[in-house]
Amino acid sequence: MLLASVVRFWTKGWIDELYIRPAFFFPYYGFGFVHPLGEATYAVFAVCGLCALLVMIGLWYRWAAAGLFLSFTYIELMDKTTYLNHYYFVSLVCLMLIFLPANVLFSVDAWRKPSLRAGRIPYWTTGSVRLLVALLYVFAGIAKLNSDWLLEALPLRIWLPARNDMPVIGPLLEKRWVAYAFSWIGCLYDLTIPLWLLLPRTRVWAYAMVVVFHVLTALLFPIGMFPYVMIVTALIFFSGEWHGRLLARLGRLVPAMPVRSATVYAYRPAAEKVLKAGLLVFFVFQFLFPFRYLLYPGELFWTEEGYRFSWRVMLMEKAGYAQFTVQDTTGRKIIVNNTLFLTPLQEKMMSTQPDMLLQYAHFLRDHFAGKGFRQPSVYVDSYVALNGRFGRPLVAPDTDLARERDTFLPKSWITPFDDTIYGF
């Protein structure tokens, strides 16, 4: 799936459009050193694609998995404009793969080195991947337990009618009850699908539901590879015997690949203890991190403080605009044309996210200081509409963003939401 994603990015020209052409990028806090490398960015994608291929066939697996994690995560961190939950999920899976024995059977490594072959592996190795997938789904379901999603069918009540041109189901998507049905079914699906996938009696039907659910979301919403990544990843819930039968069938097509072995793979005792301790810390962090939003005042969907990396998938519709004014101590003033510095996607994402507004304001401060402005101040007129509500200012218009600092502390210059969305 990652190899296909790299090829897709390359052939559609998105590497140039997203990571080379823009004049400014939005780094993640604390990762300012990660940025596009000009034309060399193509090399980063090439390394990612090559490592994905090597992991896929199981050649030099450990090194390839490490390279895949580093290259993909670097791509993910270059610009938060392109942030998606499934990028974060992929990075975490790639990190785990470095330490898991995914190459001990049906791999080039196992074909080249018979001593590596094993027919059985410790349950916790596949169990850890299942747990990560389950956390993604359950936290996505918990996030949907809010009044906008369940009681108002928002934002699906906004999104679904926009697809009324679809054949057969198009007219239905304009019905309010359909939006409510999608909202409630989506919430129940996320909260319960890991359980149905874990139970042998319901696994096949649950997997069919996974396929139907994600194919439908792929048809309705422009969310890229995410549905297909989840369809493929859910196969981890099937038993070792099921995978063994599948590998045996594939083995008839590739006779040179070893597909059966009575050997049990075992880590060295000390290494296994370290890995299990590391996984425990890893999952405690994954469990707690999505709840960091509780440390911030204000409405999460409005401030977005603690929103990213918390498995909040397609929960809100925000639209807005931001017009910046730069002035200095001599009275010079200029209204900024954002299109001179940002792509349409960057401007769209920046206009509704406070931390990106602040980063862009700092860029403008430094840019115009270089143009001769003395101690430039940066103000923004920003109006944002959340889930169909009337637009309102996101930033107090008298706030000089050039003087505000970007930290993990609450941003006091974000205006109050003056509404309540109950739940998580």
Image (cartoon, grey):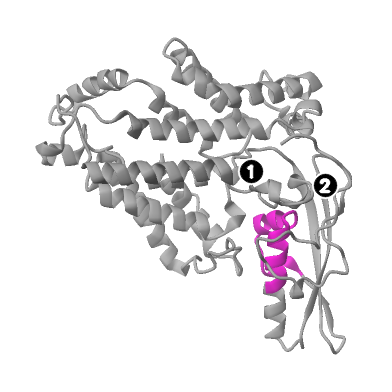
In the picture, measured across the screen, residue 13 lies left or right of residue 290, that is: left
Q: CA distance from mark 2 to mark 1?
A: 25 Å
Q: Which residues are magenta?
A: 337-362
Residue assigned mark 2:
385
Percent across and percent down for residue 37 are 46, 68
Q: Secondary structure at mark 1?
A: helix
Magenta region includes residue 341? yes
Where in the figure is residue 318, as x and y percent of width and height?
76, 46
The x, y position of residue 113, in whole percent, is 11, 41
Label 1 Cα crowd, 10 Å radius (few <14 / some 14-19 / many 20+): some
Q: Is residue 168 left or right of residue 153?
A: left
Q: Decide which of 338, 213 is in the foreground and name it.
A: 213
Q: Residue at x 27, y 52 (%)?
A: 63
Q: Position of residue 310 (x, y in %)?
A: 60, 43
Q: Is residue 184 above or below residue 30?
A: above
Q: Amino acid at mark 2?
A: Ala
Residue 191 sits above or below residue 75 on the image: above
Q: Quadrant of residue 169?
A: top right
Looking at the image, can residue 211 be seen?
no
Observer-side mark, 2 or 1, equals 1
| 157 in magenta | no
Q: Nearer the viewer, residue 299 or 176?
A: 299
Q: Is residue 261 above or below residue 344?
A: above
* Secondary structure that dominates the magenta span: helix
Q: Residue at x 68, y 47 (%)?
A: 293
Residue neighbourhood size for the residue with mark 2, other residues' Cα within 10 Å, grouped as few (<14), some (14–19), many (≥20): some
Mark 1 sits on what residue? 291
Question: Mark 2 or mark 1, which has the lower sequence index?
Answer: 1
Check residue 370 in the rendering and tell me which mark sits there, or answer none. Answer: none
